[in-house]
């Protein structure tokens, strides 16, 4: 079979163009995403990662009187008291309304852990708190685990990664490009499972 380097170059070029178009669309959505007021929610789930996520999650909990909060993916070394002190919460709120999930090691694990928690509490709607660039993939994984639960996206700005200058910041670009690749993989996997 003859070797056609021109066709290979054309295929690679086409793939790169498709990837770049998808990535720019993804970033356009991420950059314009703002939190929607989440009122009257049954549950609030914070996917661990940055302090900003925890702050937003506890603020939502205080705005929703009868809600419960799950912090998903908590390290086994982090105690309830350590988390309480780190976030400045009262013992009352920690004891009444906060659950620490320790099963998850990744986003897929967060979705599984959240589905178990939602089912055990019979929740119909849940606010999802994570970084804006992580939200699209999180929602794909969560919807795959909980197709009948209403998910309310509550994206927060990352306090460890400045996204406004991602085009000029190699570290930020690598993080969001990697997240886009994971998002595409999640979409494909969700389609295959369907």
Image (spheres, rainbow, N blue to C red):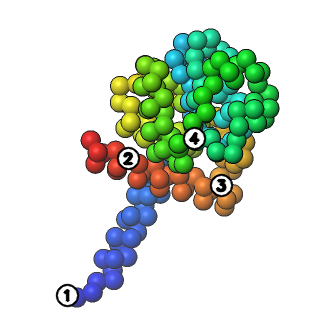
* Label ID, residue 102: 4
The answer to whether any part of residue 164 appears in the image is no
How many angstroms separate mark 4 from mark 2 (CA)? 25 Å
Vertical side of 87 occupied by 190: above or below:
below
Tell me the crowding category of disc 4: few under 14, some 14 to 19, or many 20 or more residues within 10 angstroms, Cα based. Answer: some
Residue, disc 2 = 187
Mark 3 vs mark 2: give the one in front: 2
Which of the marked residues, 3 or 4, is nearer the chain's N terminus?
4
Residue, disc 3 = 172
Tell me the crowding category of disc 3: few under 14, some 14 to 19, or many 20 or more residues within 10 angstroms, Cα based. Answer: some
Q: Secondary structure at mark 2?
A: helix
- Residue 63 lies, in percent from the top left, at 65, 15
Tell me the crowding category of disc 1: few under 14, some 14 to 19, or many 20 or more residues within 10 angstroms, Cα based. Answer: few
- Residue 80 lies, in percent from the top left, at 70, 32
Q: Secondary structure at mark 4?
A: loop
- Residue 21 lies, in percent from the top left, at 45, 53
Q: Quadrant of the C terminus?
A: top left
Tell me the crowding category of disc 2: few under 14, some 14 to 19, or many 20 or more residues within 10 angstroms, Cα based. Answer: some
């Amino acid at each position: 079979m003859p070797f056609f380097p021109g066709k290979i170059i054309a295929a690679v070029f086409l793939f790169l163009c498709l990837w770049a178009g998808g990535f720019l669309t993804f970033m356009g959505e991420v950059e314009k995403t703002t939190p929607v007021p989440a009122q009257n929610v049954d549950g609030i789930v914070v996917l661990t990662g940055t302090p900003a996520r925890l702050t937003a999650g506890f603020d939502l909990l205080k705005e929703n009187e009868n809600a419960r909060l799950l912090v998903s993916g908590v390290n086994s070394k982090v105690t309830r008291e350590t988390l309480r002190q780190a976030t400045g919460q009262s013992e009352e709120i920690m004891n009444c309304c906060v659950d620490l999930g320790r099963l998850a090691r990744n986003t897929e694990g967060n979705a599984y852990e959240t589905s178990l928690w939602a089912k055990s509490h019979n929740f119909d709607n849940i606010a999802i708190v994570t970084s804006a660039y992580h939200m699209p993939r999180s929602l794909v994984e969560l919807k795959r685990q909980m197709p009948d639960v209403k998910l309310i996206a509550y994206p927060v700005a990352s306090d460890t990664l400045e996204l406004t200058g991602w085009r000029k910041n190699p570290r930020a670009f690598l993080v969001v490009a990697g997240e886009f690749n994971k998002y595409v993989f999640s979409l494909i996997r969700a389609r295959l499972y369907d």
